[in-house]
């Protein structure tokens, strides 16, 4: 029996065993030492554990001897065995078990099976499952385990299982979680824990690389690369880039949903997978010309990244109302046409049908490049030049011809002032 544990610290290893065997050995010790007390036994065990580099409070040991604490550290049980084999005629663990049976303190094998396992035993199995199911995430595995554990004594949430699978915060977990994870691995052809650990060691490098790609990093660098791609392609929407990322990731065996990728591109998340960041870096790098570097292009495009941001649509609508008020006879539709041309000159494809609802106040936000184009229109003289006269539409409802006289087109103006057409019509009716 050895006390050394690979994951032991000053409080012992995270592995816990049922306290029934430990309490039975304590009762056997008191039979051989009737003058001893629980406090003296706890102090003796505390000194033995301290010699091994493990700090254990005496009150904790007393509570474990009385059964107030149902489980004990494996090192505590080992030291109790060593204490009994020190001078009571007991030399091996088998001698202790026979002595317990003779004293009526026998502990069955089922009572010695630990209900808890160290989380460190689950982490390699979880990473192996994720490697064998490369298209699934750790949260998907947590949901599978939650569904398998539903209806049990202790319900687990998806968040708690995800933390356990990552080996964070928790040191131990219930053995039922471990057993269900082994059952999920069996669906991938892994029959036992020994086979799982063997395959994990054989695929250690690939699993480590896959785990690194799944690692979450800050989204700041990812968002800047997204804005660089959007500026180079004059694509303000996040959908087109999200579609390209989804295609590249699917080719690499990592399917991600389009809404999730759009949220990443739109900077609605605080973190992003390193693998997604690497795919985006490759996508942007392959479009660079010779002599251009990614850092230089990001720094060069940084001042223009604000164009892709959002502003309140009311500010654009207020400028539009002022622009129309300065030019009697001009309608908002004509302003939308001119503003769409100004936006396209800046390199952003758009249509007047998309801009007119912004000018009418029907939208809550607008792109900053639309706002800047509107500011530029406000500063232009009217008309801009003699070669580019402003075409004002006819005031007649439903007429699309430009106005010529008194806000009407030539045809509507003649219809308004020429009464001969009505006279001929009257004459024709009278003739009939």
Image (spheres, rainbow, N blue to C red):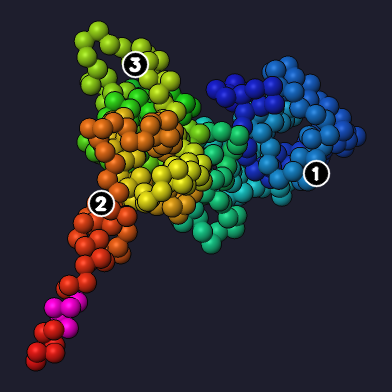
For the point 54% across and 45% down, the residue is 159
- Name which residue lies at 26% across and 66% down: 416
Image side of residue 135 versus residue 154, left or right: left
Which is more foreground, mark 2 or mark 1? 2
Q: Is residue 258 left or right of residue 378?
A: left
Query: What is the x, y in percent for residue 325?
Result: 46, 46
Mark 2 and mark 3 in contact? Answer it, CB < 8 Å. no
Check disc 3 and report its element: helix, strand or loop. helix
- What residue did someone put label 1 on? 66
Nearer the N terminus, badge 2 or badge 1? 1
Q: Residue furthest bottom?
A: 432
Outermost residue, top side: 291
Residue 101 lies, with reference to residue 147, above or below; the image says above
Magenta-colored stretch includes residue 424: yes
Residue 350 colored magenta? no
Q: Is residue 52 left or right of residue 362?
A: right
Magenta residues span 422-426
Measure the C-alpha gap from mark 2 to mark 3. 51 Å
Q: Position of residue 88 (x, y in %)?
A: 74, 29
Place of residue 13 in the rendered image (x, y in percent of width and height, measured from the top left): 62, 28
Tag nearer the camera, 2 or 3: 2
Which residue is under mark 2? 404
């Amino acid at each position: 029996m050895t006390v050394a544990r690979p994951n032991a610290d000053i409080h012992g290893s995270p592995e816990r065993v049922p306290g029934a065997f430990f309490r039975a050995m304590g009762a056997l010790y008191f039979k051989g030492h009737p003058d001893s007390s629980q406090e003296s036994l706890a102090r003796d065990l505390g000194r033995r554990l301290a010699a091994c580099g493990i700090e254990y409070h005496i009150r904790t040991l007393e509570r474990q001897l009385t059964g107030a604490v149902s489980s004990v550290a494996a090192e505590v049980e080992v030291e109790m065995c060593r204490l009994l084999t020190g001078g009571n005629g007991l030399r091996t663990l088998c001698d202790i078990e026979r002595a317990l049976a003779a004293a009526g303190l026998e502990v069955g094998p089922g009572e010695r099976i630990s209900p808890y396992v160290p989380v460190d035993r689950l982490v390699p199995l979880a990473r192996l499952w994720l490697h064998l199911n490369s298209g699934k995430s750790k949260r998907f595995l947590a949901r599978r385990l939650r569904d398998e554990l539903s209806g049990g004594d202790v319900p687990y949430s998806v968040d708690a299982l995800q933390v356990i699978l990552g080996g964070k915060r928790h040191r131990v977990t219930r053995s039922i979680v471990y057993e269900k994870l082994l059952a999920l691995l069996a669906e991938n052809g892994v029959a036992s824990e020994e086979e799982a650990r063997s395959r994990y060691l054989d695929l250690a490098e690939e699993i480590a690389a896959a785990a690194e790609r799944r690692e979450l990093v800050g989204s700041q660098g990812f968002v800047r690369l997204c804005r660089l791609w959007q500026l180079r392609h004059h694509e303000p929407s996040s959908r087109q880039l999200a579609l390209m990322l989804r295609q590249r990731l699917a080719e690499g065996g990592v399917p991600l949903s389009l809404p999730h990728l759009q949220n990443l591109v739109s900077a609605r998340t605080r973190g992003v997978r390193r693998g997604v960041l690497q795919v985006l870096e490759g996508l942007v790098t392959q479009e660079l010309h010779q002599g251009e570097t990614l850092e230089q292009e990001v720094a060069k495009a940084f001042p223009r990244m604000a164009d892709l941001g959002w502003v309140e649509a009311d500010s654009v609508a207020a400028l539009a109302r002022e622009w129309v008020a300065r030019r009697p006879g001009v309608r908002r539709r004509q302003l939308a046409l001119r503003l769409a041309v100004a936006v396209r000159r800046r390199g952003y494809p758009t249509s007047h049908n998309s801009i007119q609802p912004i000018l009418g106040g029907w939208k809550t936000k607008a792109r900053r490049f639309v706002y800047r184009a509107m500011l530029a229109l406000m500063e232009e003289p009217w008309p801009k030049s003699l070669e580019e006269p402003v075409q004002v539409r006819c005031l007649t409802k439903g007429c699309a011809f430009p106005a010529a006289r008194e806000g009407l087109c030539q045809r509507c103006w003649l219809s308004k002032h020429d009464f001969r057409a009505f006279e001929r019509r009257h004459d024709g009716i009278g003739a009939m």
